[in-house]
Amino acid sequence: MDYLEQIEHKSIHIIREAYSNFKNLAMLWSIGKDSTVLLWLARKAFFGHVPLPLVHIDTSYKIPEMIEYRDRLAMEWKLNLVYGQNKEALANKNTFPDGNATRIECCSQLKTKALQDTLHGIGTRYKIDHDTGKYEIWSNNEPFTGVIVGVRADEEGSRSKERYFSPRNVENNWEISAQPPEFWNQYKTEFAPGTHVRIHPLLDWTELNIWEYIERENIPTVSLYYDQGEKQRYRSLGCYPCTLAVESCAKNPVDIIEELKTGKFANIAERSGRAQDKDDGGGLESLRKGGYM
Ligand code: SF4
């Protein structure tokens, strides 16, 4: 078994553990490469069918190609895709790019609050109809008590502090110093009532592993990751007002793997093009303590 197979098996084991231990479980899909690998692993874990709702938080500022890709795959793979959105903040212009908020305030509203409301069943959930391809209000308002997320430990400092099964309290706050130990493949999956658990099957994967796996499995990804002739591409995808491309001539996963192996980005953080990570002076950790992914 090669290394990619080892981490693939471990991730599938964690996904199945989560599915068998949490009643109301969902999986987040940001449309980026990591959560798409996670989705691919879930399809493998359950033999082609994903038995969980996939939750996407739509800030309305995502790059249009991302939304087109999301909807195309949702139809092709018959995904139970649900999206949530903070329509009130958008209507009141509590937003950064064209409104009256800072980046941190905008992320708190359009991402963190939208996510919390969607997970808790307070906010409206919109579910895709596979017959029409349109979204309709989903009548299911039951809170999700667990959510599977595609964060990686090497991606950003605060994510390296996560557990595979990481508890949050009722307010979704993250007590970093009070997380359960995890030895070998033994995971704590029983938590006090009211606990919300985030499950992280991709913690061991690196950026290079992700691209090697995408290439090996031929996983469809958003074209924005590749140079379209302008000698630049996105290394990490997000909202268009806050996401910058990197200089690169990589046109496919093989080119990206070669580029990463040159060490070109060794000293440049993967999320360095994501402006909101830097805006509070303390990086992403303070946002994540409050519920941000
Ligand atoms: S990334 Fe930018 S546009 Fe998107 S929610 Fe955060 S501040 Fe707003």
Image: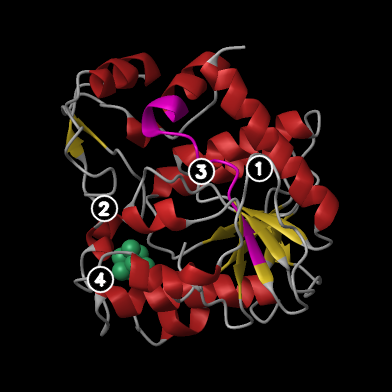
The mark lying in front, picked from 1 and 3, is 3
What is the crowding at mark 3: few (fewer than 14 residues within 10 Å), some, or many (at least 20)?
many
The yes-or-no answer for disc 4 within 8 Å of ligand 1 is yes
> Tag 4 or tag 3, which sits nearer the N-term?
4
Residue drawn at x 38%, y 20% as measured from the top left: 253
Which numbered dot is residue 74? Answer: 1
| 205 on left or right of 264 | right
Vertical side of 193 occupied by 219: above or below: above
In the rendering, at what x and y percent does residue 29 appear? Answer: 57, 50
> Tag 3 or tag 1, which sits nearer the N-term?
1
Which numbered dot is residue 97? Answer: 4
The yes-or-no answer for disc 2 within 8 Å of ligand 1 is yes
Tell me which corner region of the image, top left, top right, bottom left or bottom right, holds residue 212. Answer: top left
Question: Amino acid type of disc 3?
Answer: Leu
SS at mark 3 in the image: loop
Q: Nearer the viewer, residue 104 or 72?
A: 104
Vertical side of 136 occupied by 192: above or below: below
- Distance of label 1 from label 4 (alpha carbons): 29 Å
Residue drawn at x 49%, y 56% as measured from the top left: 162
Question: Amino acid type of disc 1?
Answer: Ala
- Distance of label 3 from label 2 (alpha carbons): 23 Å
* Magenta-drawn stretch contains 235: no
Question: Amino acid type of disc 2?
Answer: Thr
Give the number of callouts.
4
Quarter of the image that includes the N terminus: top right
Which region is colored magenta?
197-210
